[in-house]
Amino acid sequence: MKRIVLLIVAACCLFSWQSCKTGRKAQSLMKPTTFGVLEDGREVLEYTLANSAGMSATIINYGATITSLSVADRNGKMEDVVLGYDTLPGYVHGSEYFGAVVGRYGNRIGKGRFELDGQEYQLAVNNGENHLHGGNTGFNKVLWDAEILDDPERPAIRFRYVSPDGEEGYPGTVTLKVTYSLTGNNELRIDYEGVTDKPTILNPTQHSYFNLSGNFTNTVLDHRLTIEADRFTPVDAGLIPTGEFMPVEGTPLDFRQSRTIGERIDDPFEQLALGKGYDHNWVLRNYTKPGEIHKAAELYDPASGRRMAVLTDQPGIQFYSGNFLDGTATGKNGIVYRLRTGLCLETQVFPDAPNKPDFPSATLKPGQVYRQTTIYQFSTRD
């Protein structure tokens, strides 16, 4: 009998040898499939990461875009928690940045201008008089090269894009790599690495819209949010930071303790009126220096029990409450995305940092390597 038990144990370890070796839940990367074809004939591929807990993430090489993220609720029911489209034309023609990597500069730059080493640069202007998320053809609108990293401990997909000198007005040829991996602990990890051949600015971020209910006919107003910040950067009418740092205390932007998003979103507060809700950068108190990962925020949906913690090594996070979703975008399963049916938590250097000397620097020079890590960590609560 003892020998039979030992044989069974050995067989189990052989079947899931990596789990036995590391103590982690096994995960896999499925063979890519065709998601669609661009007008110029180039094929867009979709890659799927999955773990043994049932969580999965699908990402396409157009915009390095997360197209779905399937996560369990407190009862074990798996549902997609990110807004997006069922087919490629939605991502090609849409203007919402659903699930994409945006850049070169995520967020806004005032009037699309900045000065670097004594030279002024004019970027594409695509958001009123300002530059937003990389311009007219940012990283979200290009086809990235993709490479499967077959690491048995953490299989991953690495996307690579070479942005030529002068693209959207940016100086320097920038090569950016973005690696997605899904751990056995239900963490979607995103690692960025970039280099340039001349001084430039670089501040990419991930622009997924989350709705932890898994039902995109619901709003996110009942979600509870915590942000690890005592200050935020107030904005002007164009949503460009004024350069000040404002305490959150006594304002509707105080998320130091868990609060329902809808509790104060319509309060008569000037900053909320300017953003039509939350569309601001918070100054993360736990940030010390690049490369050190810290907790930035936590999102919780009481109805489903899903919880998402955001960890990053960046100094800021943009909380955007889906204020410009207006019913013109029809997404997955024919669902119309209405006001506040999704929210973004974008880790970043502050908006308009190249024009604000008191903000953290977004400058990248030859010989330096831009690095960023952001982790979306999922769990459930009763």
Image (cartoon, grey):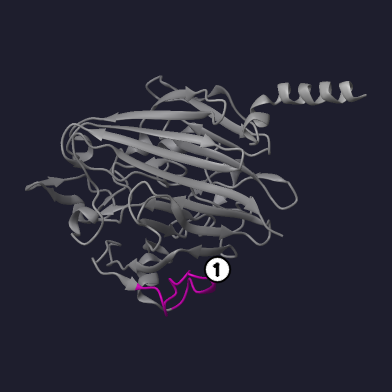
352 vs 197, nearest the viewer: 197
Extreme residue toward the left, this view: 118
Q: Dot 1: few (<14), some (14–19), or many (≥20) neighbours within 10 Å?
A: some
75 vs 139, nearest the viewer: 75
Residue 13 image offset from top left, x and y in percent: 73, 25
Left or right position of 77 against 333: right
Q: Which residue is tagged 1?
A: 258
Left or right position of 318 against 195: right
Instruction: Say which amino acid is labelled 1.
Output: Ser
Q: Is residue 129 visible?
A: no
**Magenta-tinted stretch:** 247-267
Instruction: Confirm whether the magenta stretch covers residue 173.
Output: no
284 vs 220, nearest the viewer: 284
Q: Is residue 207 above or below residue 197?
A: below
Number of marks drawn: 1
Quadrant of the snapshot with the C terminus: bottom right
Extreme residue toward the right, this view: 1
Secondary structure found at label 1: loop
Quadrant of the snapshot with the N terminus: top right
300 vs 256, nearest the viewer: 256
At horizontal 47% and vertical 42% (from top left) the residue drawn is: 99
Left or right position of 303 against 178: right
Residue 338 image offset from top left, x and y in percent: 53, 56
Residue 317 image offset from top left, x and y in percent: 40, 57
